[in-house]
Image (spheres, coloured by chain):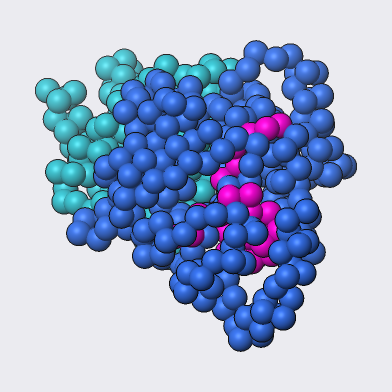
Chain colours: A blue, B cyan
Amino acid sequence: MIEVRDVRKSFGAQQVLKGISTVFEAGKNNLIIGKSGSGKTVLLKCIVGLLTPTDGHIFFDGKDYVAMNMADKVDIRRELGMLFQGGALFDSLTVEENVRFPLDMFTKMSMSDKKDRVNEVLKRVNLVNANNKFPSQLSGGMQKRTGIARAIVMNPKYLFCDEPNSGLDPQTSIVIDELIMEITEEYQITTITNTHDMNSVITNGDKILFLHEGSKHWEGDKVSLFESDNKELIDFIFASDFLKEARDARHDKLIAKLSK
Amino acid sequence: MAEYIHASGGPIFHIGRYILMIKRCFTRPERAAMYWKETLRQMSNIGVGSVMIIILISFFIGAVSTVQFAYNLSGSMVPMYYVGYIVKESLILELAPTISGLILAGKVGSNLSSELGTMRLTEQIDALEIMGVNTISYLIGPKLAAAITMVPILVIISTITGIIGGLIAGDLTGYVSSTDFTQGVLMSFVAKNIYIMLTKAAVFGFLLTSISCYQGFYSYGSSIEIGKASTRAVVLSSIMVLVADFILAWLLLN
């Protein structure tokens, strides 16, 4: 579980996060949504430690990450896995070497054990026969799968996904979303996903945090999303008139389907 | 870390951050084997990858020096075998380390800066940070170690190639016979000069690598910014190589 308590972040005079508090539960797919510039990437970077909040606290299973010394932070970081928007795969390494990198760096496993573990996670993300390919030889979807494999190879307790669907076609997006959902449930990890993809929001949001101009504007789940009368949220989710009409026309059916 | 990148400051800020970066390069590695593997990769990249250009340029530097010294000494009372001696000493004390330093500032400096800048832009550095890797130590430490080891070796190659270039040029142009040139080269041997040459080479290697890595590591924004960082890396490294050349000459020759 990750708790964010009154987190604020400013860059000079510009206040990007204005006191955000929420709890991201384990075994659930927690989504952060909001318009561009609403502060969701900054919040995610504060949580993973790439940015230090100007004020507030972030607790990883009760441990205050902001107040920790660097050595303790490194211990927490080894329990994090992160899927980056562009994959962030190391160009000079093959798929296998990319996925094996955290094992090489932080474990004393034998090479055969490491190879077994790498093959296990690559199989888990449905990426077989790509071990010796370089990132430049992979499609966008394959790069994301490699990124997920690298993120979960150390059995993390917390998984962060920054725009996992960006640059992917709708079908591949669904595959990646399903993979993240399955991994979250299977390993009972706390997953926080920063997304713009409305399909992800509507189908995968166990918990949804909606940010608007740096503040928490709404939170709930995918069912309560349809019942909310929060204007900014509705305008954001059902951006076009077509989507608004579709929502009104099929409201009850959608609620029933999502509630299952 | 990322917020530092967005900060911009004056020279004091950059010097301070550069010193902190160097300090962090020498922290204990998470896994020595990984650092060693990376150091070997960088030794190949910086050292082996630069051998041909160093040989090519040093050969002609030696050749041109021979022709010019021979031209200046012709008609004087100084015996022509002195050309070999002067070329050798010039190469050891000044030309080989400084020219190699400047060539490497261009070739290796821009390469290192672009590599780290691209890693920053594509979030590879963030990925390492999140894994808990000391990014400065892992990404810059092996490059520094490789440069401090390989640049002196390249300078030795440069000196030998320069002398060979001089020998061949002297003979081909007819200014100095190969016998006279060789006699001049073998005329005296001052061990201190070799020590000065290697010290210069190691210092230049350290400077051009650390400055280029600093520029690349702290670049941000877009590909345009990476290009600018690469240019700054080459310009600053070249200037600092020349400044260090003067300071070392002053200190070591006194």
Counting from the top left corner in percent of width and height, residue B190 is at 29, 17
* Residue A140: in magenta span: no
Q: Is residue A254 above or below residue B125?
A: below
Q: In the rendered image, which quarter is residue B82 located in? A: top left
Residue lying at the far right of the rendered structure: A129
Counting from the top left corner in percent of width and height, residue B193 is at 28, 22
Residue A83 visible at all: no
Which residue is found at the position 69% from the left and 39% from the top?
A184
Which corner quadrant holds the N terminus of chain B? top left
Q: Please tell me which residue lies in front, B164 or A167.
A: A167
Which residue is found at the position 34% from the left and 36% from the top?
A57
Q: Please tell me which residue lies in front, B63 or B245.
A: B245
Q: Please tell me which residue lies in front, A140 or B66.
A: A140
Residue lying at the far bottom of the rendered structure: A241
Which portion, as a residue range, is magenta? A187-211
Counting from the top left corner in percent of width and height, residue A170 is at 75, 67
Which residue is found at the position 50% from the left and 55% from the top?
A219
Which corner quadrant holds the C terminus of chain B? top left
